[in-house]
Amino acid sequence: MDGGWLEAQVMAKAGATHVVVMARAHPETIKEVVKAGKDFGISVMGDNLGCDDMVAAARMLEDLGCDYIIHHIGYDERRGIAAQGRRMPSPLDQLRDIVAAVNVPVQAVGGLTIEQAIDTPKYGAPLVVLGAPLTVDADSFKTASGDLGSILKHICDKVHSYGTSSS
């Protein structure tokens, strides 16, 4: 969100291959992260979390030089809206619009089930993100239970099948 070039430099020197910059950061910060990406040979992922117009934010991030777009609905946002009795938003709601708006790879993050995450390539978003559903219980932030090895094999088999079939 600030000190973009310096923060990205620290991450690159620590061995990072990718860094994330938020669309809500000042445009100069985004430009500096992109510059650092070029300077240090790392990729820049632009995250549209919290933006009023997610599609416009994705376009802006691409225009400023981000290599990837993270279309992201935050935990607190989802939970707050649901607590008001409204339908919890999902990144799938606008994923096709985001993908259509940019020419860089898109990933969807935020409240997806494992099956929904696996299906994001069907929406044109080839980067499958597997976060909280595998690692934490949504209500308590404790470790989720289950056979992680079998789950990961199922996920990889399903995602890899998208390149070889019409599913």
Image: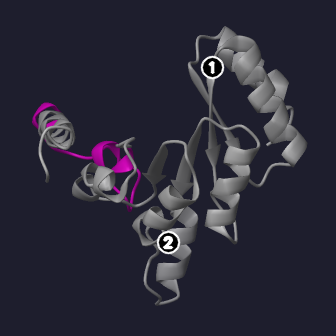
Q: Quadrant of residue 43?
A: top right
Residue drawn at x 85%, y 47% is 27
Instruction: Give the number of marks.
Output: 2
The amino acid pointed to by label 2 is: Arg
Disc number for residue 24? none
Residue drawn at x 38%, y 48% is 132
Disc number for residue 42? 1
Q: Which segment did they paint magenta? A: 131-150
Q: Quadrant of residue 155?
A: top left
Helix, strand or loop for disc 2? helix
Q: Nearer the viewer, residue 3 or 118?
A: 118
Residue drawn at x 44%, y 77% is 88
Asked whether the residues under the numbered discs 2 and 1 touch, taking CB atoms below 8 Å apart as contact, a structural biologist would say no
Helix, strand or loop for disc 1? loop
Disc number for residue 79? 2
Q: Residue furthest bottom?
A: 85
Q: Nearer the viewer, residue 56 or 138?
A: 56
Residue 2 in the image, given as x and y percentages of width and height: 85, 39
